[in-house]
Amino acid sequence: MDRFVINGGIPLEGVLEVSGSKNAALPVAVAAGILGTTDSRIHGVPDLKDIETLCGVLEHLGVRTSYHDGSLSIGASDSLGIEAPYDLVRKMRASIYVLGPLLARFGQARVSFPGGCAFGPRPVDLHLRGMEALGATVRVEHGFIIAEAGRLRGAEMSLMGPHGTSVGATANVLMAAVLAEGTSTIHDAAAEPEIVDLADFLNAMGARITGAGTNTLVVEGVPSLKGVEYTIIPDRIEAGTFLLAGAITRGDIRVRGARRQHLSSVLGKLTEADVWLDWDGKDCRVTVPNGIRSVDVSTETYPGFPTDMQAQFMGLMCLAQGTSRITENIYIERFMHVPELQRMGAQIALDDNAALVSGVRSLSGAPVMASDLRAGVVLVLAALAAQGETVVSRVYHIDRGYERIEHKLSSVGADIRRVAD
Ligand code: EPU
């Protein structure tokens, strides 16, 4: 298991390029591999552990994949396996994305039931409810979700969950509805940019989806979809993380290639915190001419403040003037980074699904442990700003979602190196 050794206190300077979006690439690759009747080529796919795992799932089903320099080639096939086993699904929950497309194209799917994850329970009831609405019978047996149907039938449904809309359920049901007979109307659909990217990709394949980016999707089923060439959107969470790396080190960074409209809530909160942002074409320059002000943040579904930026923003607030309240509304237990930040001297008190962060003058380097992707990357951010050396262990969590992060950060002056155990 690799570790990052980071010596903090260096203001970062230079350009950080944003990679393609992990969470958009995952469902797009699944759609290409299972729904396409001809080959697809997807560009802007980040070189990440999660992408490798997903390719493993597709290969297991019989899909040919090959990855080179950001482009993923996916071979079409007329017959595929229909089972995603435990060993693959437990590595990555997004493996559940194969459920809808397998059901739609081949009339059956067996997917290992995903377990909990580091930041609490993550049910899949909405995914299953959506498949049932489209006419599938779904049962859980011996740890597997088993779904069967003849041709799926278009239906009207709501995918509202207890914490709002669901990205995963929307993507999964959308990938099923595109091949259903007749029209489906999905109310309370997620409006995240990754869903829009998936809908754009499916439409390029020949699907007929309208309403992407709103909470109502209307899908007119088509008999088949062809493979296409497509480029994934930039990763808004990586972009936001880089903006925070600039801010927390009080550096002078240009984050290149992000889409401004995808980041509006994060940009708004940074501006409130007196972080200066200047856009110049594809670059967003981030500087902190004054101190960082404390601001309150509440995570919401898009276009609200993303849960995937909560940990990183908390890192910044640890060094702000004043007290901020950070409320987590999507995954109410997503606070594993708190005890690790406390080890670095942060003043944080948990209050139900909120964290009260009292800014301190400085953090101090310490040995800390990543427990998931975002809870891991905030430790890197904190370490970049802290005095002295921090050792972040279990960086495989960070590798799931950040492409060559230590190279990118070194290129703007960070003192970070990877050490293999
Ligand atoms: N939910 C249910 N039932 C379901 C599905 C979801 O109750 O059947 C609940 C969840 O427990 C949660 C809320 O609905 O409280 C939203 O979950 P959602 O389904 O939107 O999450 P997801 O699709 O499992 C994706 C991202 C996550 C990101 C969330 C929220 C991928 C592969 N994952 O997960 O990304 O946090 O949306 O935006 O796209 C990450 O990249 O670090 C990450 C965890």
Image (cartoon, rainbow, N blue to C red):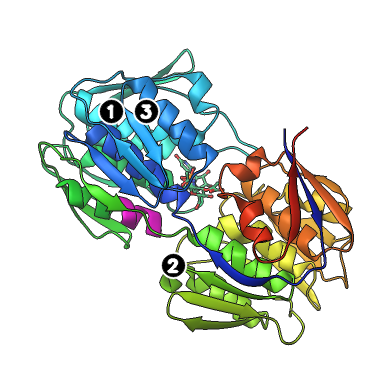
Image coords of residue 90 (percent x, y): 54, 26
Circle on res. 102:
1
Q: In which quadrant is the C terminus drawn?
A: top right
Q: Main secondary structure of the magenta part?
A: helix
Residue at x-position 50% and y-position 66%: 304
Q: Is residue 174 above or below residue 327?
A: above
Camera-nearest residue between 354 and 360: 360
Q: Amino acid at mark 2?
A: His
Residues at discs 3 and 2 in contact (Cβ within 8 Å): no
Is the distance from the Cβ of mark 3 to the nearest ligand 1 atom less than 8 Å?
no
Residue 32's image quarter? top left
The mark tally for this picture is: 3
Magenta segment boundaries in residue numbering: 192-198
Q: Mark 3 falls on what kind of element?
A: helix
Q: Amino acid at mark 3?
A: Leu
Camera-nearest residue between 240 and 96: 240
Which residue carries the number 3 mark? 58
Q: In terms of sequence position, does the residue under pointer 1 or pointer 2 come before the other?
A: 1
